Amino acid sequence: MTHSELPYANSCVRLGHYDPELAVYTQGLDSLGKDCLQTPSADTAALTARFDAKVERDEKIEPKEWMPDAYRRTLVRQISQHAHSEIVGMLPEGNWITRAPTLRRKAVLIAKVQDEGGHGMYLYSAAETLGVSRDELVAQLLAGTAKYSSIFNYPTLTWADIGAIGWLVDGAAIMNQIPICRCSYGPYARAMVRICREESFHQRQGFEIMMTLARGTPAQRAMAQDALNRWWWPSVMMFGPSDAESQHTAQSMRWKIKRFTNDELRQHFIDVTAPQADFLKLTVPDPELRWDEATQHYRCGEIDWSEFHRVVKGHGPCNRERLQARRSAHEQGRWVREAASAYAEKTRARARRLEESA
Ligand SMILES: [Fe+2]
Ligand SMILES: [Fe+2]
């Protein structure tokens, strides 16, 4: 699966300022295996054959093993964009923590937003195993050169949006992420197992909010319908460009990073979600949506790809606001990072002194 087909990172723009020669072999250098380092080209064919055979046998590729540069770059791009998406994804929902309608809803929402922060941390750690530093990745996000899922550039206008995000956005994320549990790169696959368990709780809590609103007063029903109207198409677009337009799908499927195409995943999402909307007695804002007996799938209307590209290029409703929020959080957290580093250094120095005096 490539960056453009990420559950959350549906951009088709490459990470900027990424120099594989510098970034891949920086802080992870001394922890990488010998055969990871520059290899004479005569050996490359044999290493590639060994790598391909391993992928073919469905064995995991681990950080210290040799891997093609392009595989490493694809993973760094995909995992980091996924991590950024988890972190930026905390913002639209964080917006409603102080205004959650009940104490129970508030506690659940805090836990959910905190989970997303944890997902970002696992994923930055998984990216670091490929030899890129977290500081570098965060710097790319803050500079605006890294991409994250454009779904998080839409505003959360009412409480029903929190329901719609859990139901649709986390629902779409699950469709995308379950296959990544079988991704050929070990650290990414293992991170996804726990993430998927938590995503499934997120999806259910969102659906439960929608159910409560849909069975509530006419005003609550209208609020749920309005949220579905605004979140449906951006959620469908989360699967990235159509297969015909997707540049990286074929290679990523050969590498077993990606297991299904964007359109296959999108179709699966629509097939699962449309009956849920019926159950809620809400209307999906697609007049062409209908069940097709012949194919045993839902058919749907045309996606407005111009909107998708506009938001990916930075012109969505909240792109600027999201980056600004991340930049000021980074600035305001500087003293915490400095204090934590100073404390870690002090602890290490104390341990060294104790060792020396023993
Ligand atoms: Fe998440
Ligand atoms: Fe989630």
Image (tube, grey):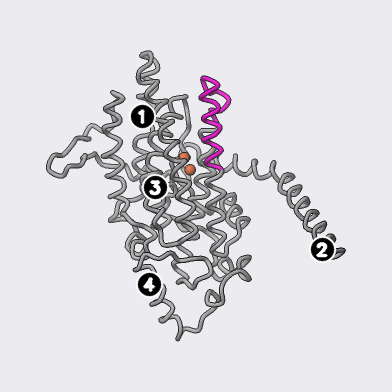
Which amino acid, mark 2? Glu
Circle 4 SS class: helix
Secondary structure of the residue carrying tag 3 is helix
Nearest-to-viewer mark from 3 and 4:
4
Q: Residue at x 45, y 56 (%)?
A: 189
Which one is nearer the viewer's eye here, 278 or 218? 278
Amino acid type, callout 3: His
- Figure check: 241 above or below 201: below
Q: Position of residue 297 (x, y in %)?
A: 20, 42
The answer to if 318 sits in the magenta stretch is: no
Q: Mark 1 or 3, which is nearer the eye?
A: 1
Name the amino acid type tagged 1.
Answer: Leu
The one of 12 and 275 positioned closer to us in this rendering = 275
Residue that label 3 marks: 309
Q: Which residue is mark 1?
A: 228
Q: Which residue is mark 2?
A: 355
Left/right placement of residue 238 relative to residue 128 reads left
Of the two numbered discs 2 and 4 on the same chain, state the one appearing first in sequence: 4
Q: Is residue 108 magenta?
A: yes
Q: Secondary structure at mark 1?
A: helix
Q: Which residues are magenta?
A: 95-117
Q: Which numbered tag is attached to residue 52?
A: 4
Tell me the kind of residue under disc 4.
Asp
Q: Earlier in the sequence, mark 1 or mark 4?
A: 4
Determine the main secondary structure of the stretch shown in magenta. Answer: helix
Q: Nearer the viewer, mark 2 or mark 4?
A: 2
How far apart marks 2 and 3 lie (CA) works out to 58 Å
Instruction: Tell me the distance, in whole angstroms, between the alpha carbons under discs 1 and 3.
Output: 21 Å
